[in-house]
Amino acid sequence: MGSESPRSALKRERVRDYLLELVESHVPGDPIPSERTLCEQLSVSRPTLRSAVDELVNTGLIVREHGRGMFVAPAKITQELVADEHSFSLPKADGTWSSRVLELTTVQAGARVGRKLHISPAAEITYIARLRLVDGEPMAIEYLHVPALLVPGLRPADMESGDFYRFLRDQHRVRVHEAVQSIEPTVTNEVEARLLGVPLLSPALLFERLTRDDTGRPVEYVHSLYRGDRYRIVSRLALGEAGAPGPDAAARHHPGIPPGDLAGRGDVPSSMVGDVQPAV
């Protein structure tokens, strides 16, 4: 990736997964081992470790306290947008999208990715890092983890043209059915900023997605970094006449709308669209 070798980029990714495993297996306030200890445990350099730690600090998963060390951050408030099949839509984002594969390799899943994909930590996954472009301009970096058994012989060209989900269906008879995706703010590190052509620590959106096929089997785990200056998510809420409130109406909260303001309206259907902003 840029001046960073594929091996270094992959090593950093594994360090990130290890740190996320630590965070997810502990409770807020628990201590994280020191950087020196982690470097020795993972056999990585201090800059590689610090880059991964900085990312989790910036996304609010780890906190540093001067003179005390690192700790698991307080839990985040999670807002889930729920809609039935009649009221949810996900239109395609603006612009002409294309991809450039930065890395494609086969590695062991590891504890965290293995747990998400419901496979053994020792099972092989196909790891793909790719740059997503809109009208030829860098827009996002995607890191995909797919069970290797599902995509034998996968080539970079397969990830650079067409729809990956259509490829899974047509070439491997894997039919994606549903996905759970989270979105939160972050900032770019040095490598990400260079790839996206933005200043260091630029605002960005971090997406995490777990995709299942029509049998309920996890087939893809992805985390992606989108430029905060060019990409935004727009949600549309259907605010009709007030209806009979449900038992939890007073506690219902919609993003950006104070709790209680929609208490008398029952369920509020929504739709979302990814919106690419024009370059200035």
Image (cartoon, grey):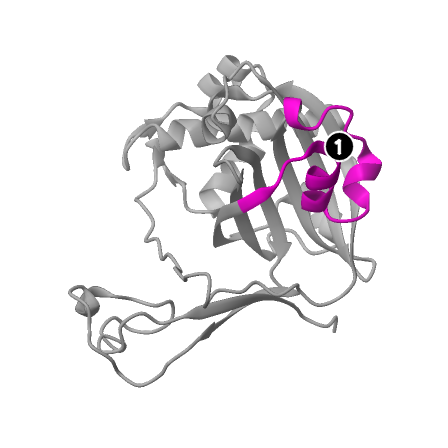
Tell which of 276 and 69 is nearer to you: 276
Disc 1 secondary structure class: strand
Q: Position of residue 39 (x, y in %)?
A: 52, 19
> Residue 208, can we see it?
no
Q: Is residue 105 above or below residue 43?
A: below
Q: Position of residue 43 (x, y in %)?
A: 57, 14
Residue at position x 38%, y 40% in the image: 63
Q: Is residue 150 magenta?
A: yes
Left of 245 or right of it: where is 138? right
Tell which of 179 and 72 is nearer to you: 179
Q: Is residue 242 magenta?
A: no
Q: Is residue 218 above or below residue 40?
A: below
Question: Residue 50: which quarter of the image?
Answer: top right
Instruction: Please state, as top left, top right, bottom left or bottom right, where the N terminus lies in the image.
Output: top right
Tell which of 105 and 39 is nearer to you: 105
* The furthest residue to the left: 247
Tell which of 157 and 58 is nearer to you: 157
Left of 23 or right of it: where is 130? right
Q: Amino acid at mark 1?
A: Glu
Which residue is identified by label 1? 103
Q: Position of residue 49 (x, y in %)?
A: 55, 28
Residue range of the region highlighted in magenta in the rendering:
149-177
Instruction: Please state, as top left, top right, bottom left or bottom right, where the C terminus lies in the image.
Output: bottom right
Residue at position x 57%, y 16% in the image: 123
